[in-house]
Amino acid sequence: MTVRQGAAAVRVAPTVVLVAVGLIVLTAGPATAGPVELTAAVCPEAPPGVEAFADQVTAWVKWGVLALIGIAAVVSLGSVLVGRMFSHPHASRYGAMGIAVVVMVAITYTVILVILGSITGSGCT
C-alpha cells in the first residue's frame, strides 16, 4: 500500500463507520415505550352569568377585526390602483405590501379563531 492509498483509506474510514452506524440504527426495531395519553381532567367553563357577556364581546371583536381586514384590503387595492394610474411607484409598492399583510392577517385571524374555539369550546373532547 502506498502513502496515497493509506491517506485515502484514512479519509474514507469515518464515512464507512458513519454509514454502518446509520444502517444499524435504521434497521433497529421500534422503541418499547408505549404512547402516553395526556387529557385534561377539568373542562374549561365560563363563570356563571359571564357566558352571555363573553360571547357578545367575542362576537364584537370578531366582526371588528373582520371589518378592519376588509377596509385594509380595499385601501391597499386602492393604493395599487392610484400608484399605477399616476405613475407613483411608492404607492403601488406600499399597496402590494399592504395586500400581502392583509392576506397574512386573514390567515392568522382564522388560526386564532380555531385556537380560541378549541380552548373555550363546548364540553370536553
Image: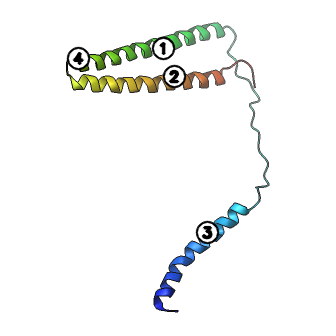
Q: Please tell me which of labels 4 and 3 falls first in the chain.
A: 3
Q: Say left or right for 19 vs 35.
A: left
**Residue under circle 2?**
109
Viewer-nearest residue: 36 or 86: 86
Which image quarter: residue 47? Answer: top right
**Residue neighbourhood size for the residue with mark 1, other residues' Cα within 10 Å, grouped as few (<14), some (14–19), many (≥20):** some
Viewer-nearest residue: 117 or 85: 85
Secondary-structure class at tag 4: helix
Q: Amino acid at mark 2?
A: Tyr
**Residue neighbourhood size for the residue with mark 4, other residues' Cα within 10 Å, grouped as few (<14), some (14–19), many (≥20):** few
**Residue under circle 4?**
85
Mark nearer the viewer, 4 or 1: 4
Mark nearer the viewer, 2 or 4: 4
CA gap, disc 3 and disc 2: 46 Å
Q: Amino acid at mark 4?
A: Met
Which image quarter: residue 30? Answer: bottom right
Label 2 with label 1: CB-CB less than 8 Å: yes
Which residue is located at x 67 percent, y 15 percent?
46
Whether 96 is drawn above or below 13: the answer is above
Q: Residue 19, which numbered label? A: 3
Which residue is located at x 52 percent, y 9 percent?
60
**Residue under circle 1?**
66
Which residue is located at x 47 percent, y 90 percent?
3
Label 1 with label 3: CB-CB less than 8 Å: no
